[in-house]
Image (cartoon, rainbow, N blue to C red):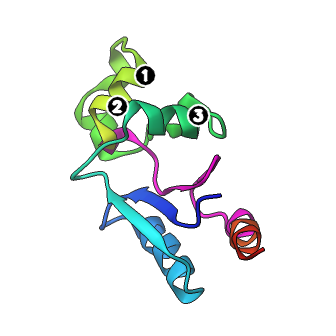
């Protein structure tokens, strides 16, 4: 199983910073993907969707959603998330075939324990 935990988010996001700190404090190898610089690939999104619904990934409270007036137009959600990663709720953490949205130390602890076995 993959031993590196991927963290998708932005440098300014407080919850993303908490996730990075959580793993750093436990000496767990992470790969941070800054959504300001790089979005999700179709494969990464498909992998995440096995654990998190498409609707839950969309940050309807975020600046980008409001800036683009998405509340008032029809769009393909998957295409929008692939083309505009700043629409995603963060952090998204991924470990092998598992993914979590937001801060979830309970799941993260299980990931760390399973990678140590």
Is residue 20 positioned above or below 2 on the image? Answer: below
> Where residue 60 sits: x, y (%)?
44, 37
> Where residue 25 sits: x, y (%)?
55, 88
Name the residue carrying label 2. 82
Name the residue carrying label 1. 77
Which mark lies nearer to you, 1 or 2?
2
Query: Which residue is at 35% across, 58% downward?
Result: 33
CA–CA distance in space, label 3 to label 2: 13 Å
Is residue 29 positioned above or below 47 on the image? Answer: below
Q: Count neighbours of disc 2 (C-alpha within 10 A) and say few if under 14, some if 14 to 19, many if 20 or more.
A: some
- In magenta stretch: residue 26: no
Most extreme residue toward the top, as rendered? 74
Query: Which residue is at 61% across, 52% downward?
Result: 96
Question: In the rendering, which numbered label is found on residue 49?
Answer: 3
Question: In the rendering, which numbered label is found on residue 91?
Answer: none
Going from N to C along the chain, the mark reached first, 1 or 3, is 3
Residue 56 visible (yes or no): no
Which mark lies nearer to you, 1 or 3?
3
């Amino acid at each position: 199983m993959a031993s590196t935990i991927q963290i998708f988010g932005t440098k300014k996001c407080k919850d993303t910073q908490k996730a990075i700190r959580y793993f750093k404090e436990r000496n767990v190898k992470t790969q941070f993907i800054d959504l300001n610089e790089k979005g999700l690939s179709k494969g990464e999104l498909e992998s995440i969707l096995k654990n998190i619904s498409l609707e839950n990934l969309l940050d309807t409270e975020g600046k980008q959603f409001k800036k683009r007036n998405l509340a008032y137009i029809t769009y393909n959600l998957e295409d929008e998330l692939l083309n505009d990663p700043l629409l995603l709720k963060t952090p998204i953490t991924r470990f092998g075939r598992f993914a979590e949205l937001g801060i979830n130390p309970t799941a993260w602890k299980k990931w760390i324990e399973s990678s140590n076995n």
